[in-house]
Image (cartoon, helix red, strand yellow):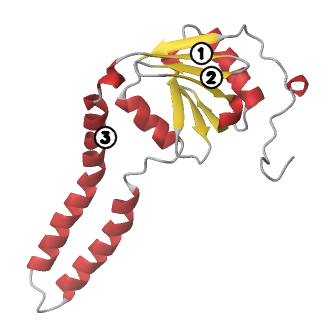
């Protein structure tokens, strides 16, 4: 280990090889719903957090205002309107995300992911990239998707399970991920 590059990939001899045959190819179109569920799985999509924190404070302020003999009904009415706006914020955020996702023409074309011992090769309409396994810091495997986080935790590659041809391909990739990355 050197101070410049503290990460040293594991030696190939210490990594068990996956059971299935490599390389494995998966292909398909990724939808906005896939993206939102992947973001939620890694904790990057939490649209309800702010409304759930602000709403109790607003309700307490509305009750305090209504208990004031000179407060009138205008304050509590404005609190109700503000509460409704806050509660609709997550739905508006989702609609804005879906609209922005669908507005990009490259999201309507299929992506091809090829998993091998060397890394993950991603082919899209606009680009082709080979990411070595050392480019990812962790993986999260859920029953319906595979999520690979790149350094910094701000960029993710996610592959829906439906994009794999067979369950054997899915299990082979899950075993490969488990042998190459933490959290797999």
* Label 2 – label 3 distance at C-alpha: 27 Å
Helix, strand or loop for disc 3 = helix
Q: Which residue is mark 2?
A: 120
Which quarter of the rendering shows the C terminus? top right
Residue 117 located left or right of residue 144: right
Rendered image: mark on residue 97: 3
Q: Which residue is mark 1?
A: 114
Residue at 25% in and 31% down: 103
Viewer-side residue, 53 vs 159: 159
Q: Position of residue 86 (x, y in %)?
A: 26, 60
Residue at 16% in and 75% down: 76
* Label 3 – label 1 distance at C-alpha: 28 Å
Q: Position of residue 143 (x, y in %)?
A: 57, 27
* Label 2 – label 1 distance at C-alpha: 6 Å
Give neighbour class at mark 3: few <14, some 14-19, many 20+ (Cα, 10 Å): some
- Mark closest to the chain's N terminus, 3 or 1: 3
- Mark closest to the chain's N terminus, 2 or 1: 1
Query: Disc 3 or disc 1, which is closer to the eye?
Result: 1
Q: Are marks 2 and 1 in contact (CB under 8 Å)?
A: yes
């Amino acid at each position: 280990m050197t101070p410049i590059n503290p990460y040293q990939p594991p030696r190939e001899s210490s990594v068990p090889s996956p059971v299935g045959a490599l390389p494995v190819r998966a292909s398909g179109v990724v939808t906005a719903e896939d993206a939102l569920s992947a973001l939620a799985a890694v904790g990057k999509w939490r649209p309800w957090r702010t409304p759930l924190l602000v709403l109790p404070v607003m309700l307490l302020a509305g009750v305090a205002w209504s208990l004031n003999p000179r407060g009138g009904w205008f304050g509590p009415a404005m609190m109700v309107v503000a509460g409704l706006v806050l509660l609709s914020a997550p739905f508006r955020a989702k609609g804005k995300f879906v609209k922005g996702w669908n507005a990009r023409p490259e999201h309507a074309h299929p992506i091809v992911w090829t998993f091998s011992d060397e890394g993950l090769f991603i082919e899209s309409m606009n680009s082709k990239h080979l990411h070595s396994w050392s480019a990812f810091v962790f993986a999260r495997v859920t029953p319906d998707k595979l999520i690979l986080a790149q350094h910094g935790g701000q960029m993710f590659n996610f592959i829906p399970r439906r994009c794999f041809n067979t369950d054997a391909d899915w299990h082979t990739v899950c075993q490969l991920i488990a042998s190459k990355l933490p959290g797999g």
